[in-house]
Image (cartoon, rainbow, N blue to C red):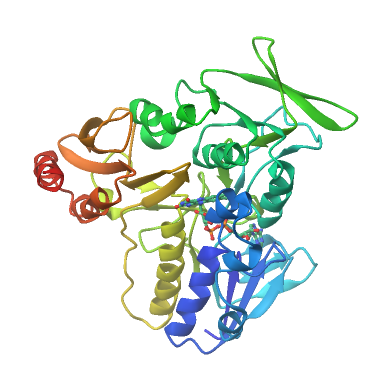
Amino acid sequence: MEHIVVIGGSLAGLRACETLRQEEFVGRITLVSAETETPYDRPPLSKKLLAGEWEPDRIRLRKTDEFESLGLDLRLGVRATALDGDARSVELSDGTTLPYDGLIIATGSAPRRLFTQPALDGVQELRTLHDSLTLRDRIADGTARVVVVGAGFIGLEVAATARQKGCAVTVLEGAPAPLVRALGMEMGIAAASVHGRNGVDLRCDVQVQGMEGADGRVHGVRLANGELIPADVVVVGVGVLPAVEWLETSTLALRDGIVCDANLFTGLPGVYAAGDCVRWPNLVFEGHDDCEMRVEHWTNAAEQGAAAARNLLAADRGEEQTAYRAVPFFWSDQFDSRIQFVGRAHGGDDIHVFAGTTDGPFAALYGWEGRLRGVLGVSMPKLVMPFRSLVAAGASWDDALAKAAELSS
Ligand SMILES: Cc1cc2nc3c(=O)[nH]c(=O)nc-3n(C[C@H](O)[C@H](O)[C@H](O)COP(=O)(O)OP(=O)(O)OC[C@H]3O[C@@H](n4cnc5c(N)ncnc54)[C@H](O)[C@@H]3O)c2cc1C
């Protein structure tokens, strides 16, 4: 290969470029990204950057000289609009066609929007640096009434940061509990209880009917029961969708993400994918009901970017490829509480709290059919990571209980 194209200039795309160079690929690398910024870190967008404690320079993923040393042909502010796998080329929004020998797709995910979401000033999502700086201005003096739609991780982090700035904050969630999708009902309520203690009005089981405004500015969120929640700022945090619409005219298999094999190979010659946009069989969970997964976490994007690059080169060099097997891991900071999770969680899992109590710091095991599936810690940093290797090894529930007893004694 002489020319590798990477689409998506965020964490997974950056790690792919770096790995290509580390693995001694000396040919041309073109990095195409819809954003005009060089790669930056998203987790602080809802935390330190939003709070005004950090400035944008601090969240750059690489210093200018480190980034320049990769020798990339940079195409920032340009969107990929179509992929032609037969011709081995990508169409770009500036009207050019970019031929490739190898391609890594790392277009991540983009916020889901509400059906009823109007174009009113004060209503926004949070995904980019620009979104975060806009919201930061809106909450900076602590006088705004903030309504967050959606009690997922990003929504709850925004709620915590806005409340710490002094804003009155209401969170509206359609499910019966916060964080249900990530942690299940019981643990979602426990992990988010820090919000009640800090004066956030967290309302579950409510349906948003629409938003109301005057002179182009939002002034409230209307619920299905008729109630109007006054708002100066509305943040819509109802999840993300994989950013793959530009691939709909290609022959790639799309099913809530780009369907890849265990090596992150898409099935099209020379085309691999990495990060939030990927659905792949994670062999760590072979035999579980959810072995094929798409993961929206920082660690996964970083590791997959590197893995996709290595496998693309290995295939070209006639070497053996390595399946990307990993135990998902994420963290979330809300008020003084740090939530961490390794593994997977589902509604019907067996749950065992093995340290602390659910009205404060605690740690819990998640099990399925006699096997350990995941571990949650709320402000219990030392009790989560030791289980990562157990989940990877497919440990039994009994072994997990024994380890939990040892750690908490
Ligand atoms: C506010 C916020 C807080 C978060 N906090 C945490 C946390 O605490 N812990 C955690 O584990 N994870 C967290 N995450 C998730 C984590 O940041 C993501 O999993 C990670 O950014 C995914 O990286 P990625 O490179 O796959 O995709 P993305 O970061 O989504 O980047 C994809 C890039 O591709 C570009 N792109 C999209 N379509 C095209 C196209 N057609 N052509 C060209 N370019 C395109 C996009 O503009 C973007 O720059 C957070 C995310 C957000 C938004």
Residue 268 relative to residue 288: left or right: right
Image quadrant occupied by the C terminus: top left
- Quadrant of the image occupied by residue 187: top left
Residue 79 location, x and y as percent? 71, 62
For the residue pair 189 and 250, the one nearer the viewer reads as 189
For the residue pair 101 and 35, the one nearer the viewer reads as 35
Quarter of image, ligand 1: bottom right
Residue 344 location, x and y as percent? 32, 43
Residue 211 relative to residue 245: left or right: right
User: Which residue ends up furthest to the top in the rendered image?
Assistant: 225
The answer to whether residue 270 shows anywhere in this view is: no
- Quadrant of the image occupied by residue 108: bottom right
User: Which residue ends up furthest to the right in the rendered image?
Assistant: 215
Relative to 183, is 211 above or below? above
Residue 182 location, x and y as percent? 41, 37
Q: How many numbered discs sit on the rendered protein? A: 0
Q: Residue at x 25, y 54 (%)?
A: 388
Relative to 338, is 28 above or below? below
